[in-house]
Image (cartoon, coloured by chain):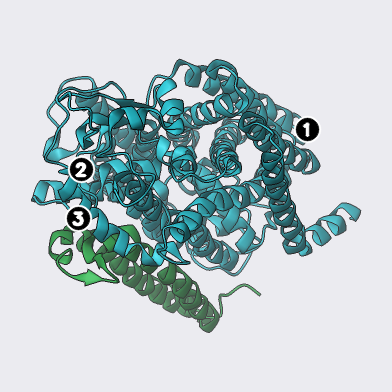
Amino acid sequence: MSEGTASREVHWGRTKNLMMVHIAIWFVFSFVVHWFAPALNKISFMHFPLGYYMAAQGALVVFVVQLFIFVKQQDKIDRECGVAED
Amino acid sequence: MSLFRMQGSFIDNLPKIYGLYTGGFLVFVGLMAILEQTGVTADTIGILFVAFTIAIYALIGWLSRTMQVDAYYVAGRQVPPVFNGMATAADWMSGASFVAMAGGIYMGGHPYLAFVVGWTGGYVLVAVLMAPYLRKFGCYTVPDFIGTRYGGNLARLLAVLVLVVASFTYVTAQINATGTIAARALLIPFEVGVWFGLLGILLCSMLGGMRAVTWTQVAQYIVLIIAYLVPVFWMSNKQGFGVVPQLVYGDAVARIIELEQLHQVGVLKPPEAVAGMSALTTLHSASHDTAIAAWRFVALAACMMLGTASLPHILMRYFTTPSVRDARKSVAWSLFFIFLLYFTAPALATFTKLQVLDPNLATSIIGKAIAEVEAIEWIQKWASVGFLAIKDFNGDGILQINEFFMRGDIVVLATPEIAGLPYVISGLVAAGGMAAAMSTADGLLLAIANALSHDLYYKIIDPKAETRKRLIVARVLLIVIGAAGALVASLQLTGILGAVAWAFCFAMSGLFFPLVLGVWWKRANRAGAVAGMAIGLGVGSWYLYMVYAGGMTPWFGIDHLRFGIVGTAASLVSMVVVSLLTPAPDAETQAMVDEVRVPRGETILGSTH
């Protein structure tokens, strides 16, 4: 096995882990928090009922921030494994 | 070479060019405001807004004309991530998002927010699972990926079929929206408005393909986001809620909860229905209270998300970036630009509702004398075109909440008038709605025409066709499909929202797992992909027919808007089972998948293929 293949395997392993982390976050803010919206609505956040806030704005903010972080993280993995573009 | 240098400088100058364009547009808005003060009629201002913006888009379309294959199909792969993000946002936000979403939230309350969550969260899937890998592949179209990854004309053909079914369903709704707005702004009949709208759409896309659509979509995004944000900022400041309305409407939500008790929202039901319109009976912020309602919320969000990650007209936007890293960045920027509108929509719905309900505001109508309300200009105007109605069921001469009917669509279009803003804002909003519907229709028509010209005509029917002939075929197909879409749209078979949800469900049923597993599961093979697409689309369509027209009781509350859940499940199971029952893909295909997974290196398909 050449060195190139080994670093590719490491790269794909780390890429898969990163994918699973982000899919997990996505799952929580896409489904879990909205499932429990009635309970969250009892909490007030910035004067909003929290369950309503999460669907109208909170989850959206998480998605946007998450993607900009993902770009940085994946880029770091690509560079460290020597497979980034020049 | 000189062409390349010219393009290079064009790309370098993008911020300056679009900065000037934005400034010019704001000057135009100012000019219209001055014209309004000098007594020019509202109708004329509306016509000027729509005509001026379409003329600009057409000019950009003409300047971007090309006879090169990679410029036509993927804009020469040199669109910077931020600009591709704006173009994707315009491509994505349709007439439905612009016109109907705030109205849907106004009428539907919390359950409707599943669309807001779904139409943003889908981009996480696009960025993490799809876009960078499809960019590395170097395909021109989505079926190009399926056809090369799995091999064989059958797989390619099925991908084309799913693409056409989903995108055509979607595009009729967009041409419908374009026609509606053109008809209203230009004072022409709807049937003429549809064809006029199509003409504008084709002017943007025909000469320059993806390159022209990219640069018009950036221009359209700028118009639509200005048009959406200005009225909300204006209203919020007028009502004293603060400078950034999206952050502070919590108090407005709380006030609505008080007013809902005062006006007995949800307690008073209309004794009889009015066709096409509804009275407000849903509480603004109350969430589902049963497990089945919670399930319906997450199922709808899931359909919109998986559909987002499968819709070819969105995925193909990420084929245009210079690199794989830029494709990822571009998804993040797309979501940011989309977020600007989507996190404003609930604020808009909230402020508009407050204008109508709050007796402390001069604009309120609920609880006032009906004779007084019927004398208001915007009530008369929208009632005369059948968008709202007042019925005094209990004969007390006072307007109760269950006696005021309207179509949700008017929330965005009529808000400037409801809030008493100058007419120039209404004209701006009409131009924004037009931009939203046109940009999406452009992307969809191009996705269909490119798949038919590249995958069906060039790859399957006539692989020896020369460049010139390929690009002429692509343009003829664009016109034919556009005309077919306009024809169907002029029949007005479905509502805009229903058609949009169906398009997402079709796309996810047929394409989601064949695309994802093509990258993430090396073992996925041709037979599995063929089964996944055919069975997914087949089962999804069957289920849609059964619950929509066949009288079948929906399983677990999965109604016709959510049929993608059933189709996608069938697609996943059949794809995995059939793949495992048939031999693994050959070494060459496996090596190709390995290559797709790393950003470095040449694309799988050549830059012109």
Q: Which chain is cyan?
A: B
Residue B382 relative to residue A80: left or right: left
Tell me the amino acid under the disc marked 2. Thr
Chain of residue at mark 2: B
Of residues B354 and B164, the one nearer the viewer is B354
Tell me the amino acid under the disc marked 1. Arg
Q: Position of residue B487 (x, y in %)?
A: 53, 17
Q: Residue at x 30, y 69 (%)?
A: A25
Chain of residue at mark 3: B
Q: Quadrant of the N terminus of chain B?
A: bottom right
| Real-space CA distance between mark 2 and mark 1, rounded to the nearest whole angstrom | 57 Å
Residue B285 visible somewhere in the drawing: no
Q: Residue at x 24, y 45 (%)?
A: B573
Of residues B553 and A39, the one nearer the viewer is A39
Q: Are marks 2 and 1 on the same chain?
A: yes
What hue does chain A carry in this figure?
green
The crowd level at tag 1 (other Cα within 10 Å; few <14, some 14-19, many 20+) is few
